[in-house]
Amino acid sequence: MFLTSIFLLVPLVVLVVYSFSGSRYATVWGGFSTQWYVRLVDNVELREALWITLKLGGLSTLLATVLGTAAALGHWRLCGGGTRAVPTFFYLPVMVPEIVLGLALLIFFTKVWTVERGLWTMTAGHVVFGVCYVFAVVSARLRGFDARLLEAARDLGATPWQAFRLVQLPMMVPGIVGGALLSLALSLDEFVISYFVTGAGISTLPVKIFAMMKKGVTPEINALATVLLMASVLLALLSIMVQGKHRAD
Amino acid sequence: MMGRLRWSWFLMLPALLWLGVFFVVPLGMTAVAAFARRGEPLEWTFSMAAWVELGRGGFGVVARDPDDAAAGWRFQNEALAVGWRTFWVSAATTAGAFLIGFPAALFMVRRSARWRRVLYGLIMIPLVANSLILAYAWVTLLRRDGLVEKFLRTLGVLGEDGSLGLIYTPSAVVLGMIYWYLPFMVYPVYSSLEKFDWRLLEAAADLGATAWQRLVHVLWPLSLPGIMTGCLLVFVQAAGTLVFPELLGGSKTRLLGPLIHDKFLSYPENYPLGSALALALMILTTFGVWQALRVSGERKDNSVS
């Protein structure tokens, strides 16, 4: 286990340490420096890619959360807390290799529904897997919900809408937030689908990073990777905190 | 009651429509495209050209070097050669992830709750990071004049100009993928070990079983469903990966993922051939997922009885 920990940590530690190197080469230590972070902030192309990544993440998360939550609610109303009839359909997109989903969407957007590829085509792809994760998380949350609470609310004079808004919705919120965060994290990190369905001149951050990596190894990529690593860890911790806090209730 | 049902379907409709349009239809078209004619880049005319091209060279094997039997053999057919390489790179990744993941899960499950959380977080690191970043971290370590070679030179193990030629080999791809897919192995194995009744081992010891016998006859069979699930998860995902072979494998280690990628995104494109390869990959992975679900389903039935 000690060796396993080293195996897990060494690549990341090396990555972070060398992002502070003053040298031009990613594997030569040239004294402590933050110049690569400064270069990063000044890089216009990267800023543009970051902006596209954030737009894509926001758009696809919003759509996936609304569609996924509605579907989970609909499914719960159809078969209650039953775990048996979980529609496998909603889990299929997650089981298909990403590359297949990517090329299928490429064929679709070039030969079936011909549109200019870019932000919207990438959004279409990201919502496909986002919806599945939101559905799974919200469904799991609803499984523990007692439908008699709604009846009780109705008996006390609430309209169906009031019963839903004041009783069921608050209980669903942690699931919705957790699913949305998961969907956002996956969208920000997603590479293969974006790579396949993006248009000319439009890159998300992962697509841009991949192009940079293919060109060569520079500490600037280390710095960028470090920033993204921190962002992913923060997002993951946030998601765990949101879910953990409500599990305690 | 009818109204209630209608409402429920109405709620599910947008999501189902979205998945129908952007998932089912594209996948269906991919299956059709495998039987279409190659054009600019695709024509909807029936053609078996992609499959003919896939089968070119036949399915036999030839010696790598006619004069040297020790050089081994290779498939004459390109797709089959790439498929075979993909298979054993995925299999090696699965085996490696198991050899690291099983002891790790075993170690974790026997610790206190606090320790467990720390170790669990550690194992899950690759999951929250981006696969590109992790592959890149391995590139900086393994590449020529990279940190591993520098370290060995400092120790004096490796000569000043010596190189191990670590990167751009199948081994580099396997190493990177073991790192990335380890969580998918540890998680199911850990969950099955968590339910394991450790008193069974004590009982076996009381009845005179040696440590080895306890491992092979008690612990192993009872944790097998979790192990199977983990292995299939890793295998299925490794088979379709693109990032690791592209960054760590170089041009000599062609795997199915990069090959499919080239048929769509590199000149000259060949959509029908790419679709046919994608179908082959889908069949392989669907079979794997189905097996994984079946095995984990059996485990549930066992725990009930």
Image: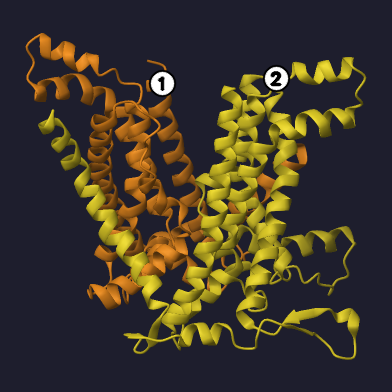
Q: Residue at x 67, y 29 (%)?
A: B193
Q: Nearer the viewer, residue A111 or B104?
A: A111
Q: Position of residue B163 (x, y in %)?
A: 81, 72
Dot 1 amino acid type: Arg
Position of B291 relative to B144 (above/below): above
Q: Residue at x 49, y 67 (%)?
A: A210
Dot 2 amino acid type: Asp
Q: In yellow, which chain?
A: B
Q: Residue at x 77, y 42 (%)?
A: A3
Q: Which mark is residue B234?
A: none
The answer to whether B153 appears left or right of B137 in the picture is right
Q: Secondary structure at mark 1?
A: helix
Residue A28 appearing in the image: no
Q: In orange, which chain?
A: A
Q: Position of residue B212 (x, y in %)?
A: 89, 32
Residue marked by disc 1:
A247
Q: Which mark is residue B197?
A: 2
Position of B111 relative to B16 (above/below): above
Residue B276 appearing in the image: yes
Position of A233 relative to A50 (above/below): above
Residue B225: quadrant of the picture: top right
Q: Nearer the viewer, residue B27 or A189?
A: B27
**Label 2 crowd (10 A; few <14 / some 14-19 / many >=20):** few
Q: Residue at x 37, y 21 (%)?
A: A246
Residue A167: quadrant of the picture: top left
Whole-angstrom CA distance, mark 1 to mark 2, is 26 Å
Q: Nearer the viewer, residue B185 or B219?
A: B219
What chain letter is assigned to the residue under label 1? A
Q: Nearer the viewer, residue A237 or A19?
A: A237
The answer to whether B166 appears left or right of B290 in the picture is right
